[in-house]
């Protein structure tokens, strides 16, 4: 260990020998969590239980946790380490979790508490965001550098500790530090529900983590996009991956690289006449994935944690950050069938200044649905499209199982935002929200500022703050997209109701809002030159990012900071070990500069 960790921090840091399991001995203070717990208590049980070092075979059915009478606390170890891997045959360093990519599945049952010891051995700072988890009362565990925490320095551990409260469904986790998740730090998170209405409609459960994949690290790609005068579009990937596996034609690989063509495909095994729930996550940097299984229709039952009225589709478009559950009936003749995880080329614009514009990518990612006993080679035919390209799955397939009516009422706060692109004085490309490009203050996150009694209206302009102070109110956001690209926007800390999605040229008409039975989720696509109107309930004190989930756009500044119920937030105390991460300013300055020298790091405030 090269550096000295100051005072308090030492108490909380677990030194971790790689590959071994650490025993937590210090007692954690658990703050917050008084909200929304209703039927669930959150007692911490078995504090001395070791953190479980988990690995997940994505091609085996999920082994369920057994349901318990009382919520339990589940301790998991997540060790971040760069390892050489060849997901599509091409070898490169991968920012892995517990040595794997995608990272292991984190499982809990509804009401359980997750205590996750994240040990950073990346040599870069890191954070983890638990995409879709509300973090009621634990805003500082949301994992967003500059908004909710300082990054975890190398060789330091942070324990994330939050309750799943009444949430259930399919989620994921990923780094929120620069574009680190695109280099590999992403994995799946599932909260099982004993009251799941579909629980007895399937026999087994599988996870499908879809992602685009680049042969260059984002340490190479981001500075290219950030170069003065860059006139290309979002970087073009090299492969689509299905649960970490893809295929690349190595004749296109640069000389000297290690590359093997014809890698094994992702194979999901099924038994004839059994039913399978597939949980599908798009964890890409950018692209829309279209998921389908030849000759097998999909019964859609969940979107972003919300139970749906079941409908049947052939193909499932999934934008970045979105999740779905579908039930697949293995009722076809015993055989091998293609699973298709196609990156939809139609949704990825390109010009010849674009980074990696001459990529040798095969956009048609393939896997295999293998029936037990099948010996034939798959030669199944793809279904025809039954969806609108580059749009979210149609709302007729997204009706909540029971209409959710709480968004129909008096709007207490209304915010109008406009998305554009522009250039700064150095001719660097920027994404602008109401004319302002977001810049995180990595060393002094917004939530730290609020708890120091800085009023949200006095936050620096480039924090892109929007303020909501009505406890239990209904907030409405109108987002106008003045740009031709579609943007999949994700809100932290909430789900939202979709009042309207407007295409290019459509007039904004309030009488068309879907107040009675809106689609409710946490990530939606805003059409190019179109608009959306969403509503959410302001009941979760915190600083919540609301941003395009195209990681290249995040890095250009397409991020808002929702400051919700600051009067309550002010009174909360951020755990000392989280605050202490901000003391590591020298280290952060060094490593952050190394990664991307265009970001302004402000002077650190001392917490002594
Ligand atoms: Cu997947 Cu800011 O989120
Ligand atoms: Cu975008």
Image: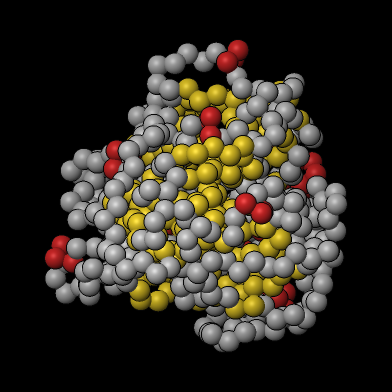
Q: Residue at left 36%, top 66%?
A: 374
Which color scheme did the rendering employ for the protein? secondary structure
Q: Residue at left 57%, top 72%?
A: 78
Quick check: 316 above or below 532? below
**Looking at this rendering, what residue extends furthest in the front direction?**
333
Quick check: 190 above or below 198? below
Query: In terms of depth relative to the viewer, which is nearer, 204 or 437?
Result: 204
Figure disc tally: 0
Q: Would you say residue 139 is visible in this rendering?
A: no
Q: Residue at left 66%, top 23%?
A: 515
Measured as percent of width and height from the top left, residue 344 is found at: 33, 43
Query: In terms of depth relative to the viewer, which is nearer, 436 or 13?
Result: 13
Quick check: 574 above or below 476? below
Measured as percent of width and height from the top left, residue 122 is found at: 47, 73
Q: Residue at left 75%, top 21%?
A: 410
Q: Quadrant of residue 300?
A: top right
Q: Quadrant of residue 232?
A: top left
- With 595 as the anchor, is 12 left or right in this view? right
Q: Quadrant of the C terminus?
A: bottom right
Measured as percent of width and height from the top left, residue 414 is found at: 65, 24
Measured as percent of width and height from the top left, residue 426 is found at: 32, 42
- With 225 as the anchor, is 507 left or right in this view? right
Query: In terms of depth relative to the viewer, which is nearer, 578 or 23?
Result: 23
Q: Would you say residue 469 is visible in this rendering?
A: yes
Q: Quadrant of the N terminus?
A: bottom right
């Amino acid at each position: 260990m090269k550096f000295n960790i100051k005072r308090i921090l030492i108490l909380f840091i677990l030194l971790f020998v790689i590959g071994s399991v650490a025993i937590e001995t210090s007692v954690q203070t658990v703050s917050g969590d008084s909200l929304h717990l209703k039927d669930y208590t959150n007692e911490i049980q078995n504090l001395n239980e070791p953190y479980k070092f988990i690995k997940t075979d994505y091609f085996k059915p999920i082994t369920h946790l057994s349901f318990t009478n009382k919520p339990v606390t589940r301790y998991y170890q997540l060790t971040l380490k760069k390892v050489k891997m060849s997901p599509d045959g091409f070898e490169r360093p991968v920012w892995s979790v517990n040595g794997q990519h995608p990272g292991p599945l984190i499982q809990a049952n509804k009401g359980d508490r997750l205590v996750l010891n994240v040990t950073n051995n990346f040599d870069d700072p890191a954070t983890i965001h638990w995409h879709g988890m509300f973090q009621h009362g634990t805003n500082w565990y949301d994992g967003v550098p500059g908004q909710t925490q300082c990054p975890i320095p190398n060789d330091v551990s942070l324990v994330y500790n939050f309750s799943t409260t009444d949430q259930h469904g399919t989620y994921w986790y990923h780094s929120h530090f620069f574009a680190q998740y695109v280099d590999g730090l992403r994995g799946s998170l599932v909260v099982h529900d004993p009251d799941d209405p579909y629980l007895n409609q399937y026999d087994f459960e599988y996870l499908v983590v879809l992602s685009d994949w680049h042969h260059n690290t984002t340490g190479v790609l981001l500075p290219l996009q950030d170069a003065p005068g860059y006139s290309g579009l979002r970087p073009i990937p090299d492969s689509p991956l299905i649960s970490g596996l893809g295929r690349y034609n190595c004749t296109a690989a640069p000389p000297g690289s290690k590359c093997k063509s014809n890698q094994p495909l992702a194979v999901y095994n099924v038994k004839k006449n059994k039913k399978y729930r597939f949980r599908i996550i798009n964890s890409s940097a950018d692209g829309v994935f279209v998921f389908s299984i030849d000759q097998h229709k999909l019964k859609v039952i969940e979107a972003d944690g919300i139970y749906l009225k079941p409908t049947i589709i052939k193909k499932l478009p999934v934008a970045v950050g979105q999740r779905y559950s579908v039930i697949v009936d293995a009722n076809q003749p015993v055989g091998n069938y293609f699973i298709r995880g196609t990156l939809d080329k139609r949704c990825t614009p390109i010009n010849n200044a674009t980074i990696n514009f001459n990529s040798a990518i095969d956009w048609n990612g393939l896997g295999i649905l293998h029936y037990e006993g099948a010996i034939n080679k798959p030669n199944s035919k793809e279904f025809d499209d039954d969806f609108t390209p580059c749009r979210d799955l149609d709302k007729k397939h997204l009706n909540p199982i029971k209409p959710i009516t709480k968004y129909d009422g008096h709007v207490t706060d209304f915010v109008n935002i406009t998305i554009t692109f522009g250039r700064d004085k150095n001719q660097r490309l920027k994404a602008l929200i109401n004319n302002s490009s977001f810049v995180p203050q990595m060393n002094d996150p917004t939530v730290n500022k609020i708890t120091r009694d800085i009023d949200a209206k006095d936050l620096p302009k480039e924090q892109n703050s929007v303020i909501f102070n009505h406890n239990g109110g209904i907030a409405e956001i109108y987002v106008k997209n003045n740009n031709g690209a579609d943007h999949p926007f994700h809100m932290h800390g909430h789900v939202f109701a979709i009042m309207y999605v407007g295409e290019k040229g459509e007039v904004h008409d309030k009488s068309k809002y879907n107040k009675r039975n809106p689609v409710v989720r946490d990530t939606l696509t805003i059409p190019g030159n179109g608009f959306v109107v969403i509503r959410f309930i302001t009941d979760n004190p915190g600083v919540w990012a609301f941003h395009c989930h195209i990681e290249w756009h995040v890095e250009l500044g397409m991020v808002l900071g929702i400051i919700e119920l600051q009067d309550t937030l002010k009174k909360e105390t951020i755990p000392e070990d989280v605050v202490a991460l901000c003391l590591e300013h020298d280290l952060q300055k060094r490593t952050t500069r190394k990664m991307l020298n265009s970001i302004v790091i402000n002077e650190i405030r001392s917490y002594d």
